[in-house]
Image: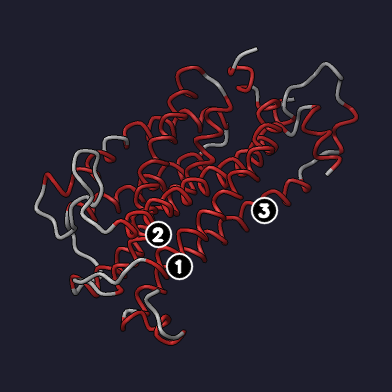
Amino acid sequence: MSWTRYAAPQRFYPLAGRAVPWFAGLALLLTVVGLVIGLLIAPTDHQQGEAYRIIFVHVPAAWMSMIVYLVMAFWAAVGLIFNTRLASMLAVALAPTGAWMTFLALWTGALWGKPTWGTWWVWDARLTSELILLFLYIGFMSLHASIDDERRADRAAAVLALVGVVNVPIIYFSVKWWNTLHQGASVSLTKAPSMATTMLAGMLIMALAFWMYCIAVALARTRVIILEREHGTRWARQLLGNS
Amino acid sequence: MNWNSVGEFLAMGGYGLYVWGSFGMCALVLAGECWGVAQRRKALRELPLDDADDRNELNERPLHEA
């Protein structure tokens, strides 16, 4: 027995079913802790006042928008190269979650930009490349939906996802490579964080909460996609018949 | 604790619209996404199951290929 055993949708389905409640529970718990720290305990920022509290949802959503894309592209590539159906299903299941994370990053960014920069939107490198990320997710989903044959749709969408990977480092390094209105990274592996400890703790806990949420909802969606695609098989019919 | 009253908490130092507009949209989107997955799962019941009986036991190809 090895991990490849779970590449079979039939075996992955119950495994994912057991995992979803754990990730969802963790997401809920971390969200409560993160919100208590972010909204009640963390001090007021001396420059931005209370407006800075948007960071507790903005940064997690922005991080996940990029991480989900990389994971999606990884599974799309696995599906393309090894012709494994489950990998492609995972990629397809991740796309809407990534698109929503990107939307939330842009939305909360606009609501943060207005009071701090005086504008909802500017066409600078960070904001524009994040908007392109949203278009890449939408393109991936539209292309997949436009092709009837599922395996052909998987392959075409995978190529698009892989081409789009180049955008992720552009988003991440945009604040370094270009002169942008967007502030630089608040957290990096090489420097001490430029924020108070409670602020940092709240932000990291919220980021973890978003991470757990994305795993839970993507796995739940993968289970639905498995049944949609496999409903002609005997095991899926039995499951659907009993539900 | 930074807040002396609920009103002060909701006002967010004058940035209430921006802060709650952000947190509110996140809550709405995450709840909406979960609802969407649950709806899609419910829709699985509408998938054709009646063709099942006339299929050979050894034939496990998906219906749309059969």
Secondary structure under the numbered disc 3 in the rendered image: helix
At 35% from the left edge and 64% from the top edge, which residue is drawn? A108
Q: Quadrant location of the C terminus of chain A?
A: top right
Amino acid at circle 2: Leu
Q: Name the residue under label 2.
A: A104
Q: Name the residue under label 3.
A: B38
Q: Quadrant location of the N terminus of chain A?
A: top right
Residue A85 x, y percent position in the rendering = 58, 25
At 19% from the left edge and 64% from the top edge, which residue is drawn? A122
**Is A129 placed left or right of B64 in the picture?**
left
Neighbourhood count class around disc 3 (C-alpha, 10 Å): few under 14, some 14–19, many 20 upward = some
Secondary structure under the numbered disc 2 in the rendered image: helix
Secondary structure under the numbered disc 1 in the rendered image: helix
**CB-based contact (under 8 Å), mark 2 and mark 1:** yes
**CB-based contact (under 8 Å), mark 3 and mark 2:** no
Q: Which of marks 3 and 1 is nearer the N terminus?
A: 1
Q: Do labels 2 and 1 share a chain?
A: no
Per the model, the C-alpha gap separating discs 3 and 2 is 21 Å
At 86% from the left edge and 19% from the top edge, which residue is drawn? B57
Letter of the chain that mark 1 sits on in the rendering: B
Residue B24 x, y percent position in the rendering = 46, 70
The residue mark sitting in front, 3 or 1, is: 1
B52 up-or-down from A112: above or below: above
